[in-house]
Amino acid sequence: MSNSFDVVIIGTGPGGYVCAIRCAQLGLKTAVVERWPTFGGTCLNVGCIPSKALLESSELFHRAEVEFKKHGIAVDPTIDLATMHKRKDRVVASNTRGVAGLFKKNGVIAFHGLGSITGAGQVTVTPDEGDATVLTAEHIVIATGSEPSSIPGVDLDGARVVTSTEALTFDAVPERLAVIGAGVIGMEMGSVWNRLGAKVTVFEYQDRLFPFADKDVSKAAMKSFRKQKFAFNLGVAVQRTELMDDGVKVIFKAKGADEEQEFVADKVLVAVGRRPNTDGLGADVMGVALDKRGYVTIDSHWRTNVPGIYAIGDVVGGLMLAHKAEDEGIALAEQIAGKPGHVNYDAIPSVIYTAPEIASVGKTQEELEAAGVAFKSGQFPFLANGRAKAMEQKEGFVKILADATTDRILGVHMIGPVVGELIAEMVLAMEFGATAEDIARTCHAHPTLSEVVREAALDTIGRVIHF
Ligand code: FAD
Ligand code: NAD
């Protein structure tokens, strides 16, 4: 078999593997290089999929423990963590095997080992054992993703001071879990262990939970997480952690204060963001430019400064989301094959899989205000929705922001039951340039949660019915 390809893709996360499949479908001879034993990258192995598996299991436990009795069902549930982890591992394996199957089906050739750019149009694959293989390609795609970052003074030891990767495999429920960072990972993984019985204390530098979210959503989420017995230290800077015999000390200061405060936990989850992964990639060999934070620099067509080398996904920055990486992978494949490829960055949804779930697309109210855009806002609570009442899931609301003049939808922010599914309608609406009135005039089945979306749209034009 010749090791000469049209396209070689380094990394098989959602960006890389989807790009490879699309390249192969378009008739390009395609190879992927993956340093891990299984395909699917962070998302399938240690990210989206295992975290959602544990969120599902822990949510079921929580419902059985707390909510079943509201329905007149009496149970006394216990946790079998080993089985929970085994189920999660099966879910992961079925997904990663699925990617291997898709490579085979589409004729994508896979190489295992560290992929490094070693010359013009050349990628060297160095496996853990055995000889290196040199691949040549007209097009090289960097899809090497990201890895967890930490903060000065907080040394990750993988046992007691950990990242999301280890927090997915705790073999016992920690009694006291400290979470540094009230972002997506902090609150998703914090929710898993909180539901299973840990006392979770969150340390966040900003003065609110989910600092990037719409303020109303952030506020409602805070109220809900407080009810779930999370403890919060907001507006604090963690200075360092210290390992002790019987725990880990988290030393922090309120912003602007001199005085240090201490908190003792059994485990500390560090969830302060992720950084681009270019270790061992050989970006410097051909002079691929990185920005000052280490992200690969690209133009609007995912081209680096070196002809024939492209980059997609977490390694280029922007929203660090699997579906953003996938869309870039597809668009880039189309472009390499000589077709138009496009990603609409204004219509990429974000979902946080906590309970209540949080979902958004487009601009937040604060972003519109800062940009001086005139807008109108409509909001409707799940509390006034028949299906939500029947489900005993009455927390949250849908908020729609529309242009004051044209009525076009500019942003949608949701917190409530399964809003991660409800957001799809609004992403589509935005892709089609819909107005709030278009949504308000669309028939939504009764009784469904989607009626909340319609009522929020009705509210933007002052015609709400059920509130
Ligand atoms: P990655 O998935 O990081 O894949 C990069 C791949 O490249 C890896 O397999 C790596 O081994 C390989 N690689 C790196 N360097 C080399 C090299 N030199 N040679 C060979 N191989 C190499 N996003 C969502 O949209 N929804 C979620 O619910 C969600 N949940 C998450 C939960 C957690 C706990 C975490 C950590 C992340 C989550 N994310 C989620 C984010 C999502 O995982 C990432 O945005 C996504 O995986 C990025 O895809 P990627 O292809 O750019 O890179
Ligand atoms: P994040 O950016 O979501 O949150 C990091 C949080 O840490 C922020 O609130 C930030 O203010 C805070 N922080 C930063 N430095 C701090 C410090 N010194 N002390 C206290 N707080 C500090 O990052 P993350 O939660 O680590 O997640 C990483 C990426 O993974 C995100 O970009 C996210 O999009 C992605 N992800 C997505 C999902 C999902 O889509 N459901 C799930 C998990 C992860």
Image (spheres, rainbow, N blue to C red):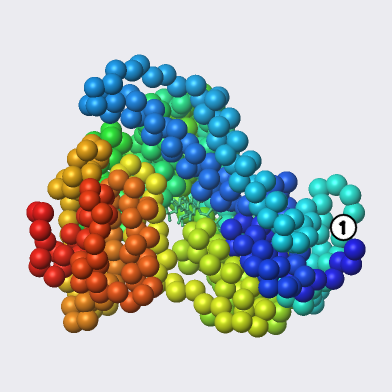
For the residue pair 199 and 41, the one nearer the viewer reads as 41
Number of numbered markers: 1
Ligand 1 is within 8 Å of the C-beta of the residue at disc 1 = no
Residue in the picture at 24% in, 26% down: 71
Q: Quadrant of the N terminus?
A: bottom right
In the rendered view, tell whether residue 306 sits above or below residue 41.
below
203 versus 465 height, above or below = above
Quadrant of res 18: bottom right
Judged left or right of residue 389, residue 344 is: right
| Residue 332 visible, this orientation | yes
Q: Nearer the viewer, residue 160 or 264?
A: 160
Task: Tell me the kind of residue under disc 1.
Answer: Ala
Give the quarter the ligand 1 occupies. Answer: bottom right
Who's the residue at 34% across and 71% down the image?
Answer: 430
Q: From where the camera sits, is residue 280 visible?
A: no
462 sits left or right of 223 in the view: left
Which secondary structure lies at badge 1?
loop
Residue denoted by label 1: 132
Where residue 221 appears, as percent x and y from the top left, is 27, 47
Residue at 28% in and 33% down: 229
